[in-house]
């Protein structure tokens, strides 16, 4: 019973640890990291949402940098 409980607990906490590390990286501006989307449950949905968020933030950051470069070039 203890081994089964440990296996279940690890299978639930390992993806959350991975998501936490990726979210922390994203919050520091590293938009290249992604979460593995290998589950078909709520944790898989959360992983996909984090990856979409990273994609959108990366695109916005790229657009911001282009805007600053264009404005500074025009000035």
Image (cartoon, helix red, strand yellow):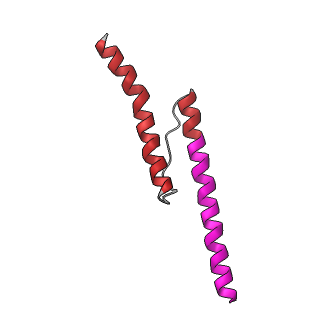
Residue 73, relative to residue 54: is it above or below?
below
Residue at 55 percent across and 33 percent down: it is: 44
Is-magenta flag for residue 73?
yes
Nearer to us in this view, 70 or 28: 28
Quarter of the figure with residue 16: top left
Q: Is residue 15 left or right of residue 49?
A: left
List the single residue furthest toward the left.
Answer: 2
Residue 69, relative to residue 37: is it above or below?
below
Residue 66, relative to residue 55: is it above or below?
below
Residue at 47 percent across and 41 percent down: it is: 19
Percent coordinates x, y for residue 9 in the rendering: 38, 23
What secondary structure do most residues of the magenta stretch adopt? Answer: helix
Query: The magenta stretch spans which residues?
Result: 49-75
Residue at 29 percent across and 13 percent down: it is: 2
Is-magenta flag for residue 72?
yes
Percent coordinates x, y for residue 29 in the rendering: 50, 60
Percent coordinates x, y for residue 71 in the rendering: 68, 82
**Total label count?**
0
Nearer to us in this view, 6 or 34: 6
Q: Is residue 65 left or right of residue 3?
A: right
Percent coordinates x, y for residue 15 in the rendering: 44, 34
Figure quadrant of the C terminus: bottom right
Residue at 66 percent across and 67 percent down: it is: 63
Figure quadrant of the N terminus: top left
């Amino acid at each position: 019973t203890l081994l089964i409980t440990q296996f279940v607990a690890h299978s639930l906490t390992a993806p959350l640890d991975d998501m936490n590390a990726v979210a922390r990286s994203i919050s520091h501006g590293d938009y290249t990291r992604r979460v593995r989307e290998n589950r078909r449950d709520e944790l898989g949905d959360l992983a996909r949402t984090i990856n979409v968020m990273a994609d959108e933030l990366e695109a916005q950051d790229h657009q911001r940098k282009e805007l600053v470069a264009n404005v500074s070039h025009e000035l």
